[in-house]
Image: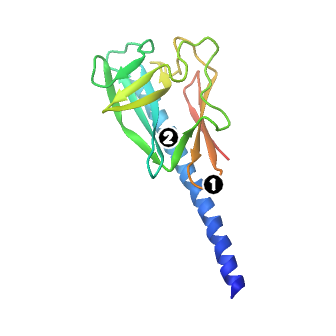
Amino acid sequence: MAIVALLSTFAGLGLSSVSGASRLGTSLFRAASYIDQARSYAVAHGTYVYVGQRSAGGADPATEFIVVGSQNGEDLSSQTNLVVGAGDVALLAKPLLTNQVNYSTNAPSDVVRPAGAALNTGDQKITAKGNEYQTLLAFGPSGTVTFGGAIPSIVEFGLRHSGRTSSVGVIQVAGLTGMSRVYQQ
């Protein structure tokens, strides 16, 4: 009887780890798809599009992504705060909330930017509906990732499951093509 109870306990612990990794994988692919849609919008409309993220803390930690863009095709990378509804900035998609997943600066790689790029992590914010987001990516009209006129070879950022697992994942975006890849550990 004790053996059955012990095996049940270990099986339960294993399933929670698998469940956490599965949630992280789903969140990674949803975020990558959201980024791909932002790039597609930039190309289709010949404009600049910005992807931001914020931690939506609380009892159930989450990361929320947002996509905004220039309504007249102007490069807004020189602005320090893109305010939705003010001037030329428009919300392009409903924000994406990834539950139980945290944006992680401790993941294998944080946002990688080209040397000398004008835009660095934390330099540009997006403000929408009273929430402030950190700009992660900017897509130009050709679909390339741009930072103050520079095109990085890649941009990577990590997401980590907020539960008991050590699951971590990285979304990698190629600078020249703007295409994303997902890696999970």
Q: Is residue 48 left or right of residue 148?
A: left
> Looking at the picture, does residue 113 appear above or below residue 34?
above
Query: Can the viewer see residue 46?
Result: no
**Where in the figure is residue 185, as x and y percent of width and height?**
68, 47
Q: Could you tell me the amino acid type at mark 1?
A: Thr
Q: Nearer the viewer, mark 1 or mark 2?
A: 1
Front residue of 48 and 81: 81
Instruction: Identify the disc placed on residue 31.
Output: 2
Disc 2 crowd, CA 10 A, few/some/many (<14, 14-19, 20+): many
Task: Describe the colour scheme in one phrase.
Answer: rainbow
Q: Secondary structure at mark 1?
A: loop
Q: Secondary structure at mark 2?
A: helix
**Where in the figure is residue 57, as x and y percent of width and height?**
45, 44
Q: Residue at x 54, y 26 (%)?
A: 178
> Looking at the picture, does residue 99 appear above or below residue 32?
below
Q: Which residue occupies the extreme right position in the image?
A: 3
Q: Residue at x 49, y 44 (%)?
A: 30
Marks 1 and 2, how far apart at CA? 20 Å
Disc 1 crowd, CA 10 A, few/some/many (<14, 14-19, 20+): some
**Where in the figure is residue 181, as x and y percent of width and height?**
60, 37
Q: Is residue 181 left or right of residue 33?
A: right
Front residue of 7 and 44: 7
Placement of the N terminus among the 4 image quadrants: bottom right
> Looking at the picture, does residue 76 appear above or below residue 64?
above
The residue to which callout 1 is attached is 165
Residues at badges 1 and 2 in contact (C-beta under 8 Å)? no
Query: Can the viewer see residue 161?
Result: yes
Front residue of 47 and 157: 157
